[in-house]
Amino acid sequence: MAKSKKQKQAAMMRGLRQSAQSGYIPLVNQRTGKKEMVSAEEFKETYKMPMQFSDEECREMAAGRVGLNLSETNHPFHHKTADGTIVAPDPTLEYFLSRLTDEQRRQFHEVYDPTPEQEARASKAVPVDRMYYGYDMYEGLV
């Protein structure tokens, strides 16, 4: 019998917790597709959560996120999730934009707001479910 989506995700999270307890975290190199085991300490030192970024890093990440969204969905503010669902708005992009000054945010929208052609070509998006994992990681921050 096939596992449900929730069962698969629960199994994946159990595996990640077990890996973290062993001191190593599995990462997949997106360029090569190879799976690598990275020590939890190295991961903490190297990889940051969005809340740990400086304001300048948030500006850079917002521009990068728009590029990713355009390549995946043909729309700057729609995001393709890990399971292939296209959601709008992109919660991580919203967080990055919330960290910008009003002037930076205005300039960002002047450059990246979708054109009518982009809107027409964009894949259909469903409203984002911020509580998908049981909590909203950006609650109170956006």
Image (cartoon, rainbow, N blue to C red):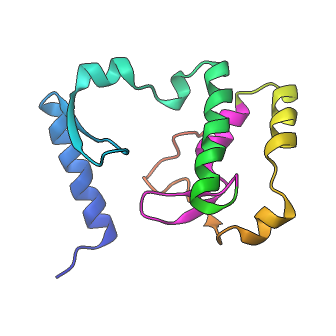
Residue at 69% x, 53% y is: 77
Residue 140 in view here: no
Residue 17 in view here: yes
Residue 106 sits in quarter: top right
**Residue closer to the observer: 64 or 6:** 64
Report whether 98 appears left or right of 37.
right
**Whether residue 95 is situated above or below residue 102 in the rendered picture:** below
Residue at 26% x, 49% y is: 13
Residue at 82% x, 28% y is: 104
Image position, residue 141 (x, y; %): 64, 33
**Residue closer to the observer: 23 or 109:** 109
Image position, residue 92 (x, y; %): 59, 42
Report whether 69 appears left or right of 98.
left
Please identify the residue farthest to the bottom as the structure is shown.
1
Image position, residue 62 (x, y; %): 66, 36
Is 85 colored magenta in this rendering? Answer: yes
**Whether residue 16 is situated above or below residue 75 in the rendered picture:** above
Residue 28 sits in quarter: top left
The part of the chain drawn in magenta is 76-98
Residue at 32% x, 41% y is: 29
Number of numbered discs overlaid on the protein picture:
0
